[in-house]
Amino acid sequence: MNPMLRVTLILLIIGCIASSCESKNGLVSDEILPIDSNATPETVALYQNLKAFSGSGTLFGHQDDLAYGYNWWDEAGRSDVLEASGSYPAVYGWDLGNIVEKQVNLDGINFEKMRGWITEGYSRGGVITFSWHMVNPVTGGDSWDTVPTISGILPGAEAHETYKNWLDIFAGFASTLTGEGGELIPIIFRPFHEHNGNWFWWGKGINSEEDYIALWRFTVEYLRDEKGVHNLLWAFSPDRSRTNIDNFKEDYFYGYPGDEYVDIIGLDNYWDVGHPANDTDPEIQQQNLIRSLAYTAQIADSLNKVAALTETGTEALPNPTIWTDTYLSALQANEWTKEITYMLVWRNANFERENRDHFYASFDGHATQEDFIRFKESEFIFFESELPNLYTRTD
């Protein structure tokens, strides 16, 4: 299909917001609002447009896309996704790890330059999402320092003021992210991700579920109500590997802070796409990928929220047809999997700097490039060059 025709059709779909078209649960798009009643107009528009977009296609995203690639570092205009497919990704992932104590994040990206790349992606219509591999506020160790921590940073605890100071730094950074018109750039914020695993200091088994919920709620209320940060959409993202596929809808809600504290119903799923620790038959993995996406979408629909595959990928892409045989076939498997609004694959580590094949998106010349192009050319998958305006309401 002609790219301009695709955009026209999607604009007509998004136009349903103005004409009160119904979602599966009978709610009209005008009733889809972020948890922040004072969210900026652009943030509200992004949220409502993503919801209206749901079922029409999936936006493709990549972590750290503009900062570096497999064989380059900090070169203006470059992107492994662009060079492999002909377009930048539709969604840009960035991480705030080390924002408190260093000028560069945990992957070596300078925060000042990150600000510029965020503005660049937004100016072309891309969607921005943040994760935060936060340093342990109690011990000073990294995110993987699994000392029980949350109880020590809640209100009244010894390290609470430290945690608040860190949120102040984040609030300051978020307030400097502006578009050409001076408007704040909307951010999909995904803190304390994969909390049902035990590899981060905020994880399950290290802290109580009640403390995790209290931390999430405090963080939302402090940033929104006290610091006045109104350009955030909040994404909740448990890890699939610690979610029983046969009990998914119950397991998913471990640590869920409540509908009034979450905008995006997300899932991090490396497990069903070829994780080396998963010895399940590949056909069963594909079936489980489809089930996990469908269940995530069903949960989002029941809550009138947006569904997303918030983090995924297979290191070094050993399957040459992963894009179409794994991802595209799963996303198009049924009416529910089609409700996944965006997917984000992890970063392409620079080989010279890290001396390892730690990449999750195709790059020019890689064995998966041909399949990546087929994936990009699918009418169901959207890269940046095919996006409608997601930051303006059509009414």
Image: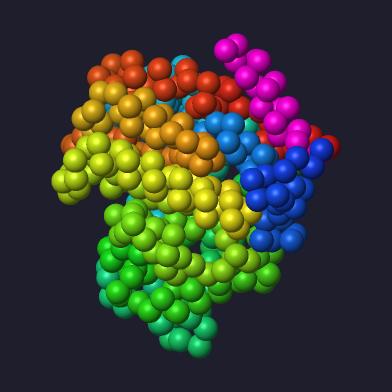
Residue 228, quarter of the rendered image: bottom right
- The chief SS type of the magenta part is helix
Residue at image point 68% right, 23% down:
9
Residue at image point 44% right, 56% down:
237
Position above or below: 104 against 390: below
Residue 3, quarter of the rendered image: top right
Residue 84, quarter of the rendered image: top left
Residue at image point 60% right, 65% down:
259
Q: Is residue 228 left or right of residue 151?
A: right
Query: Quick check: is 12 in the magenta stretch?
Result: yes
Instruction: Look at the image and tell me in which quarter the N terminus lies.
Output: top right
Instruction: Look at the image and tell me in which quarter the C terminus lies.
Output: top right
In x, y percent, where is residue 50?
A: 63, 41
Residue at image point 51% right, 42% down:
336
In x, y percent, where is residue 295?
A: 45, 51
Residue 69 appears in the picture as rendered: no
Q: Is residue 73 left or right of residue 395?
A: left
Of residues 188 and 319, the one nearer the viewer is: 319
Question: How has the structure been colored for display?
Answer: rainbow
Position above or below: 374 against 271: above
Residue 197 appears in the picture as rendered: yes
Q: Is residue 350 left or right of residue 159?
A: left
In x, y percent, where is residue 90?
A: 53, 32
Query: Quick check: is 284 in the magenta stretch?
Result: no
Q: Which residues are magenta?
A: 1-18
In x, y percent, where is residue 70?
A: 29, 29
